[in-house]
Image: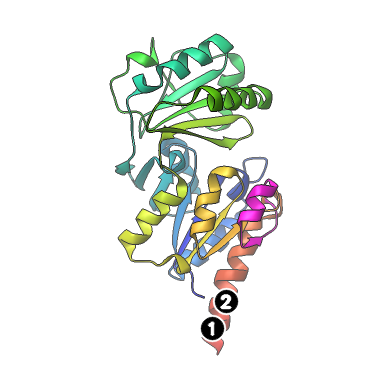
Amino acid sequence: MSYRLIALDVDGTLLNDKDELTQRTALTIREAHEAGARIVLCTGRGPANAVPVLDELGLQGVLITHNGAATVESPGPKLLHEYSYDVRQIEGLIEYCRSQSIHYDVCTALDMFVDRVGEEAAGMYDKFGVVVQRVEDVLAMTAPVVKCTLFGSGEQLDAAESELSQIGLPPGIQSIRSGAHFLDIMAEGVSKGSALRQLAELWDIPASEILAIGNYYNDIDMITFAGLGIAVANSPDAVKAAADVVGLSNNEEGVHHAVQRYVLEAASGAAGQ
């Protein structure tokens, strides 16, 4: 099978645990691109700290950001599509976070805003290369919001998920765990998989010709949509169970090995027949 679109999660998949993109992985991805495959980063990151990863790969093009809530194109970035909501729809959630001392930020398609930030959250933003904008009260914002992210310890977010399951979210709003320390609040129906499906239809690429690689629960939709869905070895069991193949971990250059095997070597073998 020839894969014309390669969808790659970033953190925990493309990057190793030191948040590094290895040279060999970058070379392999560029080789696949030069062979004709479209490379699409599919990430929970916003464009501001996702586009630099694409730049590091030496590529330009389309990225699925905010877990599918905003699709952008670089250079620019240029916003192609967004799924947004009014921040006042989640006023109860924001008040809950304030009462429980859970950090939160809210994102428009291109920017991130906070009205309070502690030392731990500041360190997290620095780690991921995020520049946040300070406002007095995020609930006073009028711009459409594509995502609100809760950040805290695993125990805090486990408790928050449990609380949300009991009280429920407003109509048209959903939550998804995008990492051990992150819980994202987005418009209902938004996912990496749905955004990838939309791109595939736009580019007239059947699901059978898509390869997707991920590592966490927010990657399951795109892994199951793709013709070949790969979970790296550091994925939770539920993600591995959803995948067609379990590859090497992000610390073992799992993306490099998968693209070599299923894209480059497969193409070389087909050419030699």
Closer to the camera in the image, 9 or 175 = 175
Question: Does the segment drawn in magenta span residue 237?
Answer: yes
Q: How many marks?
A: 2
x and y, in percent, of residue 265 in the image: 59, 75
Relative horizontal placement of residue 221, taking residue 61 as reference (left or right):
right
Pick out the residue farthest to the front: 166
List the residue tagged with mark 2: 266
Residue, x 55% and y 28% (percent of image)? 165
Relative horizontal placement of residue 141, taking residue 59 as reference (left or right):
left
| Mark 2 neighbour density, 10 Å: few (under 14) some (14–19) many (20 or more) | some
Which residues, given as a range, are shown in magenta? Answer: 235-249
Label ID, residue 112: none
SS assignment at label 1: helix
List the residue tagged with mark 1: 270
Decide if residue 9 is in sight here: no
SS assignment at label 2: helix
Amino acid bearing label 1: Ala
Give the Cα distance between marks 1 and 2: 6 Å
Q: Quadrant of residue 124?
A: top right
Establish if 186 lies above or below 122. Answer: below
Residue, x 57% and y 22% (percent of image)? 163
Tell me, yes or no, whether the two marked residues, 1 and 2, touch with CB atoms within 8 Å. Answer: yes
